[in-house]
Amino acid sequence: MGAKAVIIDHEPLMAAQLKKMLQKGKTAIEVKAICYEGEQAMACLAAHQPDIVFLTLEMPRVSGMTIAKQIEAEKEPHPAIVFVTGQRDFISQTLRLNVLDYLVKPVTEGEVRRVVEKFCAVYTKKEAPSQEGASLTTADGGERPSYARRFSVDEGDKIKLIATEDIRLVYAEKRKVYLVTLSGRTYPSHLSLVQFEKRLPEDIFFRCHRNYIVNIDEVQQIEPWFNHQYVLILKGMEDQPCPSADRMSRSSGSMSTYRPRADSK
């Protein structure tokens, strides 16, 4: 399929076994390098520019979680991240990062094949198009961006997954970002508005204001406001208009803001 991978694992035997599994079958992925030291991980990734990274969480000295955060902090595009771990307890932590999937040691061929197939379905191929890759390109031959199907939010001491189609609104207030569902519940999120904007499908979601991203299908009406500005009235939120000033006017100082209270259940 032309995709490149890097394996980051401090256990040579486990890394060698994973490499062998990845290079099998029709969806084989070329393993460009194996990095055994967490301190060398970012340099290895910079040198090989992989499309996907298999990252062991229990790396000594520099953990896989730390490396994943460093990857996300880098300039996009980022490689897909698959966490490899020997402890299922770590899985809940991975939901806070934009990871493709996870593998639990001892890794099996079936699980590796499942992850590779998921990777093929989500990420656009950069090589010559094939029948399998045709569905990942637009009609004019350009690349179609991949969007997140779900987002993780905090719900007390638990992590809840919200389907993209269940999101009504995302907004920022006082350096925090909140997600509002179609049912009207509000949750704090660890993502920034910029990250949401990149991961939400642009044909459904619109950043109407520097602090707001709305689900277009949830817009009930648009009303004029002061100084040639507008507010959006969303379904079920008639008394809480969303500003739409930044895209229509330079002034936004007089716009009222939406302040729902985050659920604490």
Image (cartoon, helix red, strand yellow):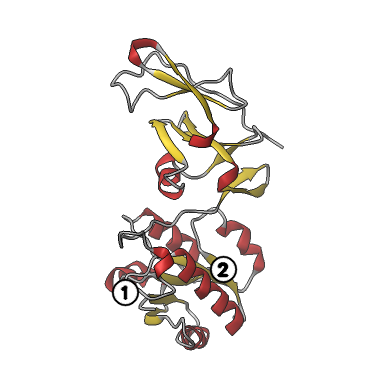
Q: Which residue is drawn at 35% across and 19% down?
A: 252
Is 249 placed above or below 205 here?
above
Residue 109 in view (yes/no): yes
Element assignment for label 1: loop
Across and down, in percent, residue 52 comes to 42, 70
* Quadrant housing the N terminus: bottom left
Name the residue type under label 2. Answer: Tyr
- Amino acid type assigned to the residue bearing label 1 in the image: Glu
Residue 62 visible from this viewpoint = no
* Residue 33 picture quarter: bottom left
The numbered mark, 1 or 2, whose residue comes first in the sequence reads 2
Q: Quadrant of residue 154?
A: top right
**Residue depicted at x 62% and y 32%:** 262
Mark 1 to mark 2 CA distance (whole Å): 25 Å
The residue that mark 2 highlights is 102
Q: Where is residue 180 in the image (x, y as percent from the top left)?
A: 58, 35
Residue 67 vs residue 94, the one in the foreground:
94
Q: Is residue 73 above or below residue 8?
A: above
Q: Percent position (x, y) of residue 17?
A: 51, 87
Q: Which of marks 1 and 2 is in front?
A: 1
Report the residue that reaches farthest toward the right: 265
Q: What residue did someone put label 1 on?
A: 127
Classify the position of the C terminus by image quarter. Answer: top right
